[in-house]
Every structure is written in structure tokens, then in C-alpha cells.
Image (cartoon, grey):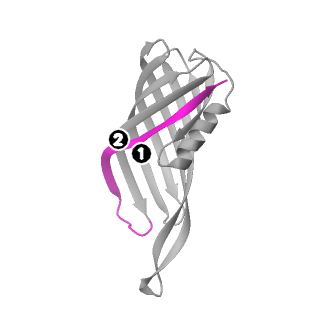
Amino acid sequence: MKQRLLLFFLMILCVGFGFSQEKGKFGILFKSSSSYYVGLKFNLSDKITLRPTLGFSSDKIEKESPQGPDSVVELDSKQYKVGLGLFYYFLKKNQFSAYIGPELGYFHQTQTDFDRYDANIIFGLQYNLNKHLAVFGEVGFGYSKSKSAARQKEQTSWGVSQSGFGIILYL
């Protein structure tokens, strides 16, 4: 958690100035959630934004060893995520704005051969610090369908997902 906050504040300190949300403008997005995300933000109009994202994280996982249940092996696992969202900005007051929209995603974990497909509704708040820099926070509610090599049966779930915060650098 300390590393995420430090990374967030370092990105803010290293940023120059940019454009606010105007039609035809785009920005680079950095989001911290359960993974780190990098994305692009395309303002299709003053109220509609398209946002493709890529995510990556790395963890150590423990797995039962072939030598028996008392023996555990620690493995490096990498997670990848791809997402695409379309957001409608329904409130804009001064530098503050609120948005809502659907986001589709695909998640893959290497060591466990785990795949998940997500369909979420995201609600977010954004504050423009200046013409080139904005901060945001968002939470999502959605549906997930997952399958792993260990469990051949597909699992589905509903719930809160994709919560996180980040910054946007407008170019």
C-alpha cells in the first residue's frame, strides 16, 4: 500500500501541464487497484469518453508440492488485464465531474492458468487539478465469469469490483 501511495504522489510531482476534458483531446491514465493499469482516455465529445486499459501485477503464490500436503512451493505469478470502457460524464461543476458507464475486461493469471471475464458498471468522480492533470476515484459493480485449469467448472459471481484511484495526464 505504501508503494502505491508513493507511486501515486511521485507521478503527480513529475507531471507537467495539459488539457482539460474537451472533445477530441486524449490523455494517459494511470490507475491503482488490485493491479496497476495504464490506459488511454479519448474524449469523443464533451460528455462521452472511450477508455482502453492494460493492467499488470506480479505476486508470489503458495501451491502444494508434489511431495505431499506438508510441503509447499512458492511460485511467481503474473496477472494481465485488458479492459475497455465507455463513460458518460453526467455532472460537471468547475473542476469536478462525475461519470458512469460500462467496462468490459479480461484477466489472466499465468501460474494457475486462471481466466476471468468481467462486465462492470463503473461510477467515478474526477477532479481536474489543472488543464493537464486530473485525479479520479471509481468503484464498479459487475458480473464475472471465471475458469481455471485446476477447476474445470466455470464460476460466476456478482459484486463490487474495479475500485481504484489514479491520475490522468492530458496531452
The spot of residue 7 in percent (x, y) is 59, 42
80 and 69: which one is in front?
69
Dot 2 alpha-carbon crowd within 10 angstroms: few under 14, some 14 to 19, many 20 or more:
some
Q: Quadrant of residue 78?
A: bottom right
Q: Is residue 83 left or right of residue 138?
A: right
Q: Residue at left 63%, top 18%?
A: 19
Q: Residue at left 51%, top 77%?
A: 73
In terms of secondary structure, where does tag 2 sit? strand
Q: Amino acid at mark 2?
A: Gly
Which of disc 1 and disc 2 is earlier in sequence? 1
**Prevailing secondary structure of the magenta residues:** strand
Dot 1 alpha-carbon crowd within 10 angstroms: few under 14, some 14 to 19, many 20 or more:
many
Q: Is residue 140 left or right of residue 105?
A: left
What's the magenta region? 149-171
Note whether 56 is above or below 131 in the view shown. below
Task: Identify the residue at the far bottom of this view.
Answer: 67
Q: Answer whether residue 151 is magenta in the image.
A: yes
Q: Which residue is mark 2?
A: 142
Q: Tell me how far mark 2 sits from mark 1, CA to CA.
A: 7 Å
Residue 54, visible in the rendered structure:
no
In terms of secondary structure, where does tag 1 sit? strand
In the image, which disc is placed on residue 118?
Answer: 1
Q: Which part of the image, by quadrant, shows the C terminus?
A: top right
Q: Residue at left 47%, top 88%?
A: 67
The spot of residue 79 in percent (x, y) is 53, 55
Q: Are marks 2 and 1 in contact (CB under 8 Å)?
A: yes
Q: Quadrant of residue 162?
A: top left
35 and 44: which one is in front?
35
Residue 4, visible in the rendered structure:
yes
The spot of residue 49 in percent (x, y) is 51, 24
